[in-house]
Amino acid sequence: MKINFLKSVSANVLIRIAFIFLFLIMTGTNLLAKREKYNYITLYTNVGEITFRLYNQTPLHRDNFIKLVKVRFFDGILFHRVIDNFMIQTGDPDSKAKEAGKLYGNGGPGYDLPAEIIPGLYHKRGVVAAAREGDSVNPERKSSGSQFYIVKGKVFDDEGLITVENRINTRNAANNIHGQHAIHDEWREIYKTVGGTPHLDTQYTVFGEVIQGYDIVEKISAKPTDSNDRPVEDIIILSAKIKKSRKLK
């Protein structure tokens, strides 16, 4: 009887230790998540400042953007393509020449990036995503090494979102991507209230999100443009700076 009692006590002790160990692991994981650091980029433009957080879920795009900022790649570049209720686009180094009336949008750092199209990152208003060549010449949907856009978008109703789903599935099928895309319920609610560009989901890499200065995005979006969607008045990135922190202070 004594032996069985001791075995029972030992078993209970081991169970308690296991629970404590599991609790410590879970607590440590939560603490690490809370302490995760992010990279914040501030674009100083001639019409105001825009700050966005780079997503850690897209490390190739995050690290590439950080590298470009550190070498001052974006200084002097234009927002060369602006479409109201859609997006504002920049990142073409050729636009530093600021030649009047010229169509920009073909320049870059000389390389592309592999797509990082991550489930859960979608085109709600204010996200930052990589521009790219179309599927016909870029079936792997590789990203431009430097060109990116910030989403303004618009609000959709249920009928519009169904049309978007059909459009995405048709495009994916043409690119030999099988499986039906359905807009997640949470995303659907955002698209119906806040807005965005849902037809770009699963098509382009989303790698960041504006957290300050969205009013400047709207201001740029409303600027008059020419027939090539280039703002008549040059919108210039004067400089870009980076800060790494758990939260923006």
Image (cartoon, helix red, strand yellow):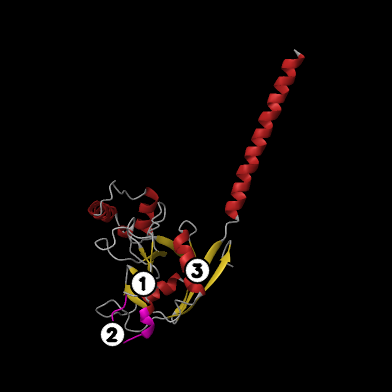
Q: Which amino acid type is marked by label 2?
A: Gly
Residue 179 placement, left or right of 125: left
Numbered circle sitting on residue 113:
none
Q: Which amino acid type is marked by label 1?
A: Gln
**Figure check: 74 above or below 136:** below
Lower sequence index among marks 1 and 2: 1
Quadrant of the rendered image containing residue 21: top right
Q: Residue at x 59, y 54 (%)?
A: 34
Of badges 2 and 3, nearer the viewer stands 3
Circle 1: is it few (<14), some (14-19), or many (20+) Cα within 10 Å?
many
Q: Which residues are magenta?
A: 94-105
The quarter in which the N terminus is drawn is top right
The quarter in which the C terminus is drawn is bottom right
| Nearest the eye: 152 or 235 | 235
Question: Disc 3 versus disc 1: distance between alpha carbons?
Answer: 18 Å
Secondary element under disc 3, as helix, strand or loop, is helix
> Farthest residue toward the right?
2
Lower sequence index among marks 2 and 3: 3
Q: Is residue 51 visible?
A: no
Residue 232 belongs to the span the image colors magenta: no
Numbered circle sitting on residue 89:
1
Residue 103 belongs to the span the image colors magenta: yes
Image label count: 3
Quadrant of the rendered image containing residue 127: bottom left
User: What residue would you read off at disc 2?
Assistant: 101
User: What residue would you read off at disc 3?
Assistant: 66
The x and y percentages for residue 23 are: 63, 40
Secondary element under disc 2, as helix, strand or loop, is loop
The x and y percentages for residue 65 are: 46, 68
